[in-house]
Image (tube, rainbow, N blue to C red):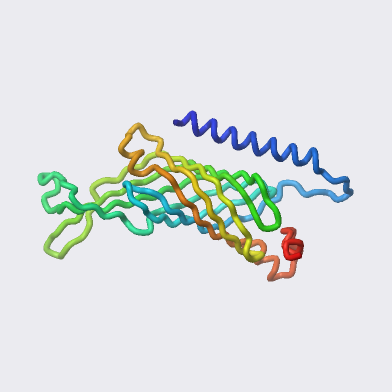
Amino acid sequence: MYRFVIIAIGLLICLNANAQLDSTTVAEPVSDTVVKKNQWKFLFAFDARTSWVLGERAGLAGLKIGTTLNKKHKFGLGLYFLKQPIVRGGVNLSETDYPTATDTTRYNFGYSSLFYEPIWFTNKRLTLSTPLHLGTATVNASYLYRDTTGAGYTEYFEGRVKMFEISGVANFKIFRWFAIGAGAGYRGLLTPDANARRAFGGPVLIFQAKIMFGVIYKLAFKKPIDDGWEQAKD
């Protein structure tokens, strides 16, 4: 599985590099204008998704923070967690180890990741990309217990495992400073435990909202913006 992930990263980087080379070779205009290199832009995006956890549909809240290089590469950190824990009944814990436990168990699931997102196509409003996430998933389980103060949950298991996620995403700019996106992909856990892979891996539906703080800043101070927005309105 690690070999698959390494190969996938290599292919994404190589294909993206070749696409840029072909585009530059064929379409490079003759101009005296000096093109700036290594243009970095701050990236902040809400990155919610719907996935399948423990065999049921669940919503994950997400956030991406990073940077965009030359409008072709995105890098950064992603944080994701269940909007609501998954509660299951019929789980029988050891009466010796957990004498106050009932058969109700609550599960939490989340992950943090480093992501690389090559941009394959972009115009004045639409952007197509294929984000790849590599990180660590955390599984937390707690059981319902009763004591003299009432009922609550007590943690009895927490595990961490490496994970990957690959997807395709389309973003559409609604306002000059705001865009929404949607996509689909697959999340896998890098563990030999087949039960864990089935329980926490699976298809992913992605919903994004992206705020362009750099554009907001330039609009506020009336600075020039090279985003093609004026042409897009024509």
Q: How many marks?
A: 0
Position of residue 165 in the picture relative to residue 150 (left or right): right
Quadrant where the N terminus is found in the figure: top left
Quadrant where the C terminus is found in the figure: bottom right
Position of residue 84 in the picture relative to residue 171 (left or right): left
**Based on the displayed image, in which of its 4 quarters is residue 8 positioned?**
top right
For the point 64% across and 52% down, which residue is it? 127
For the point 65% across and 44% down, which residue is it? 120
How far across and down, in percent of the image, does residue 23 sit?
Answer: 75, 41
Most extreme residue toward the top, as rendered? 3
Q: Nearer the viewer, residue 99 or 209?
A: 209
How far across and down, in percent of the image, does residue 152 sit?
Answer: 21, 60
For the point 54% across and 57% down, which residue is it? 45
How far across and down, in percent of the image, does residue 169 sit?
Answer: 56, 50
Q: Nearer the viewer, residue 192 or 136?
A: 192
Q: Where is 164 relative to 209, above or below?
A: above
Position of residue 210 in the picture relative to residue 159 (left or right): right
Position of residue 140 in the picture relative to residue 60 (left or right): left
How far across and down, in percent of the image, does residue 228 sit?
Answer: 74, 59
